[in-house]
Image: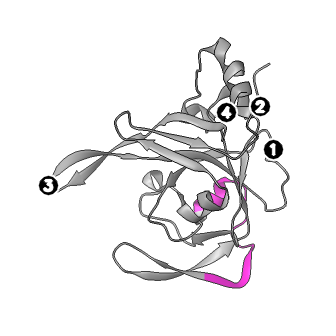
């Protein structure tokens, strides 16, 4: 399987915990959201970090503002199609579903303009309201979506990185290695991936 995301650093997050503050880490992946019929995202399509949540039983979960930031109208939801979501506190909520497509973006410069489509079952279930602190709320990628895309994911807790391999022909791995050799295997930071155009440098 060819490497698609190479040692992307986990996001360090400080949280209040038991009367103090502790540090934890989020595995964030760069993702673009498009209309379901898009053959490929536009070069200026907005990318944002999605949190890989292995405990999420759904394909993905977002909030209304995540869809709006991606340029999708949340009101164009699937009619009569909903899903029951159970939170960690056992609260159950029925979520509407917005038909959409997700694209994983590579942090390898040679693959920058070739996002990988992540097949969804129905679309993106979303909370149709604004969270109290939207600046710290990430949309979630569930394990079902990554399994459906037949990805291999490795989280290196020693170096605090996440890497992803995608299905491909056997010779694509050595070919990519040779293309990266002149650049000494550099990678693109997450903030840059989700802040600039996907178009490859000239």
Asked if residue 72 is among those painted magenta in the image, a careful observer would answer yes
**Relative image position of residue 16 (x, y in whole percent):** 23, 52
Q: Residue furthest top?
A: 182
Q: Which residue is mark 3?
A: 19
Left or right: residue 153 versus residue 148 is: left
Name the image quarter holding residue 187. top right
Calculate the distance from the C-alpha at mark 3 to the C-alpha at mark 1: 46 Å
Q: Is residue 35 visible?
A: yes
* Dot 2: element: loop
Q: Which residue is mark 2?
A: 199
Q: Give the position of the N terminus as an image quadrant.
A: top right
Magenta span of residues = 65-82
Q: Which residue was labeled with disc 4?
A: 196
Question: What coloring was used for the rendering?
Answer: one colour
Question: Which is nearer the N-term, disc 3 or disc 2?
Answer: 3
Q: Position of residue 139 (x, y in %)?
A: 54, 58
Q: Nearer the viewer, residue 82 or 157?
A: 157
The mark nearer the N terminus, 3 or 1, is 3
Q: Check disc 2: other Cα within 10 Å, few if <14, some if 14-19, many if 20+.
A: some
The residue sitting at 69% across, 32% down in the picture is 173
Res 42 label:
1
**Cα–Cα span, label 2 and label 4:** 9 Å
């Amino acid at each position: 399987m060819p490497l698609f995301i190479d040692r992307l650093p986990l996001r360090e997050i400080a949280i209040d915990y038991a009367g103090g503050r502790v540090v934890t880490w989020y595995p964030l992946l760069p993702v673009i959201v498009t209309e379901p019929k898009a053959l490929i995202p536009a070069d200026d399509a907005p990318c944002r970090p999605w949190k890989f949540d292995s405990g999420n039983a759904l394909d993905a979960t977002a909030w209304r503002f995540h869809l709006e930031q991606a340029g999708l109208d949340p009101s164009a939801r699937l009619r009569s199609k909903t899903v029951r979501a159970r939170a960690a506190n056992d609260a159950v909520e029925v979520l509407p579903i917005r038909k959409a497509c997700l694209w994983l973006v590579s942090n390898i410069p040679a693959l920058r303009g070739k996002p990988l489509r992540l097949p969804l079952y129905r679309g993106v279930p979303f909370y149709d309201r604004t969270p109290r602190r939207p600046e710290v709320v990430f949309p979630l990628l569930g394990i079902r979506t990554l399994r459906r895309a037949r990805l291999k994911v490795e989280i290196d807790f020693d170096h605090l990185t996440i890497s992803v391999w995608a299905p491909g022909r056997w010779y694509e791995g050595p070919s990519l290695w040779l293309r990266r050799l002149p650049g000494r295997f550099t990678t693109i930071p997450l903030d840059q991936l989700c802040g600039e155009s996907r178009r490859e440098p000239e």
